[in-house]
């Protein structure tokens, strides 16, 4: 994930049995108030050269919903602070067609562990 001069957030949500999606345990029970409920956050500032920066993020989440209903996990990305920011997934802010530029792939692996 990279952002074009600003704040970018990604969060993991879960829906069980078609219910409304809720944030997972990453946010915890602390007071959210005006804060963004986010699994991870990135900030880029115009004084930094982040044109070619592409941070790598990893999430490991052990869930134990104890249900036989369908469970849907979803990653949601946003730039909640300003509509002038852009959130990029799997690429750098500058997307030159050159050997020094990169494209990557994301993957999600779900495992059911029978107890």
Image (tube, rainbow, N blue to C red):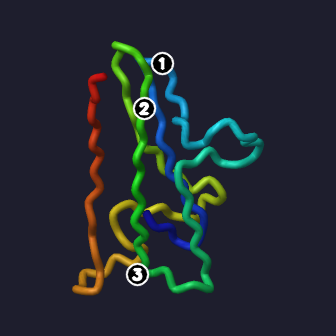
N-terminal-most mark, 1 or 3: 1
Q: Position of residue 2 (x, y in %)?
A: 46, 67
Numbered disc 3: secondary structure: loop
Q: Is residue 94 left or right of residue 23?
A: left
Query: For mark 2, does the 10 Å Cα neighbourhood hold few (<14), some (14 to 19), or many (20 or more) residues?
Result: few
Kindly check if marks 1 and 3 are in contact, taking CB atoms under 8 A apart as contact.
Answer: no
**Image mark for residue 52:** 3
N-terminal-most mark, 1 or 2: 1
* Quadrant containing the N terminus in the rendered view: bottom left
Q: Mark 2 — residue?
A: 63
Above/below status of 21 relative to 32:
above
The mark lying in front, picked from 2 and 3, is 2
Numbered disc 2: secondary structure: loop
Q: Position of residue 60 (x, y in %)?
A: 40, 47
Q: Mark 1 — residue?
A: 19
The mark lying in front, picked from 1 and 2, is 2
User: Looking at the image, which residue is at 48% across and 61% down?
Assistant: 87
* Quadrant containing the C terminus in the rendered view: top left
Above/below status of 104 relative to 27:
below
Q: Is residue 8 left or right of residue 95?
A: right
Whole-Å distance between the Cαs marked 1 and 2? Answer: 17 Å
Q: Position of residue 10 (x, y in %)?
A: 50, 51
**Image mark for residue 9:** none
Query: For mark 3, does the 10 Å Cα neighbourhood hold few (<14), some (14 to 19), or many (20 or more) residues?
Result: some
Q: Is residue 28 left or right of residue 11?
A: right
């Amino acid at each position: 994930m990279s952002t074009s001069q600003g704040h970018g957030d990604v969060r993991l949500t879960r829906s069980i049995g078609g219910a409304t999606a809720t944030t997972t345990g990453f946010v915890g029970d602390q007071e959210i108030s005006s804060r963004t409920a986010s699994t991870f956050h990135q900030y880029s500032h115009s004084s930094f050269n982040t044109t070619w920066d592409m941070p790598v993020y990893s999430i490991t989440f052990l869930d134990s919903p104890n249900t036989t209903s369908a469970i849907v996990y979803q990653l949601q990305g946003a730039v909640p602070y300003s509509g002038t920011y852009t959130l990029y997934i799997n690429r750098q802010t500058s997307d030159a067609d050159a050997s020094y530029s990169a494209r990557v792939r994301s993957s999600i692996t779900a495992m059911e562990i029978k107890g």
